């Protein structure tokens, strides 16, 4: 396989060159901003949540990898784009199962295995160009919807944990919109030569920030745990 082979996958790119996708490249700044905002939130929450910090670092890797791919645009560079995304999805799925749903490690590993099997199988059983090659992201969208529904089902309406399901539903809604925009990128070329992939970046950066915020603000972590314990002491009095 020729890893240096140029790829032309998006509406904005009309040929080889580092700046053949200016909006797709520059819009990756949104991922850096999301990671920075999440890091500040993590610090204010006490700075002790290691899983959340690792996910923030993966978000930085997503920003770097996507920037490289949308400038270099080669078959090898695309790995720098998709691998960090896959790591974030796997890590967040385990976090949902362990932190939000309180399931055991074995259950989390089983859920991750099912997710990975679906993620690898689905693209191979669907037409290659379906939805502008967005099919591999369908399992991630489904994961978000299922996670939001399961967390909502396990928490009381007015409990501190209920805010997490709200964040997950917001992330699912944003990701649905970004998925749609990614799927029509080539289709809108005739009317909008820049395409819609750069909006996919901006919306997905927001999705990652929302997911990170949900993890950081989960009751029992950092500042949230102190607020929760303080409220319990007041109720006992």
Image (cartoon, helix red, strand yellow):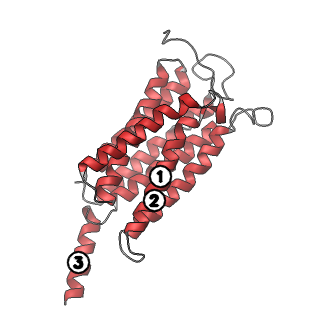
Residue 155: image quadrant is bottom left
Question: Which quadrant does the C terminus fall into?
Answer: bottom left
Label 3 secondary element:
helix
Residue wearing tag 2: 148
| Marks 3, 2: nearer the viewer | 2
Reading the image, the residue beneath label 1 is 144
Compared across the picture, whether 158 is left or right of 124 comes to left
Q: Mark 1 Cα within 10 Å, few/some/many (few <14, many 20+)? A: many
Asked if residue 138 lies left or right of residue 187, the reply is left
Residue 135 drawn at (x, y percent): 58, 36
Q: CA distance from mark 3 to mark 2?
A: 27 Å
Instruction: Please name the residue that numbered disc 3 is placed on.
Output: 230
Element under label 1? helix
**Quick one: which residue is furthest to the top in this view?**
2
Question: Image check: 138 left or right of 185?
Answer: left
Residue shown at 27% from the left, 65% from the top: 223
Q: How far across and down, in percent of the image, does residue 49 sit?
A: 25, 53
Viewer-closest of 179 and 53:
179
Q: Residues within 10 Å of mark 3 (few under 14, many from 20)?
A: few
Q: Is residue 65 visible?
A: no
Disc 2 is placed on an element classified as helix
Of labels 3 and 1, earlier in sequence is 1
CB within 8 Å, label 1 to label 2: yes
Q: Residue furthest bottom?
A: 237
């Amino acid at each position: 396989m020729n890893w240096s082979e140029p790829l032309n996958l998006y509406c904005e790119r009309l040929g080889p060159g580092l700046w053949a996708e200016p909006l797709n490249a520059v819009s990756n700044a949104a991922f850096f901003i999301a990671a920075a905002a999440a890091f500040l939130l993590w610090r204010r929450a006490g700075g002790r949540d290691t899983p959340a910090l690792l996910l923030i670092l993966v978000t930085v890797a997503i920003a770097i990898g996507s920037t490289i791919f949308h400038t270099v645009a080669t078959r090898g560079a695309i790995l720098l784009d998709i691998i960090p995304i896959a790591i974030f999805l796997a890590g967040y799925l385990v976090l949902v199962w362990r932190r939000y749903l309180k399931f055991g490690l074995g259950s989390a590993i089983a859920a991750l295995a099912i997710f990975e099997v679906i993620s690898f199988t689905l693209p191979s059983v669907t037409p290659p160009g379906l939805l502008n090659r967005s099919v591999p992201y369908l399992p991630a969208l489904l994961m978000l919807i299922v996670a939001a529904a399961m967390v909502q089902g396990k928490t009381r309406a007015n409990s501190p944990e209920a805010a997490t399901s709200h964040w997950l539903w917001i992330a699912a809604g944003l990701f649905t919109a970004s998925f749609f925009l990614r799927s029509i990128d080539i289709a809108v070329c005739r009317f909008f030569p820049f395409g819609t992939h750069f909006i996919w970046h901006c919306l997905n950066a927001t999705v990652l920030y929302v997911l990170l915020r949900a993890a950081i603000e989960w009751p029992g972590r950092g500042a949230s745990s102190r607020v929760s314990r303080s409220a319990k002491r007041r109720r006992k009095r």
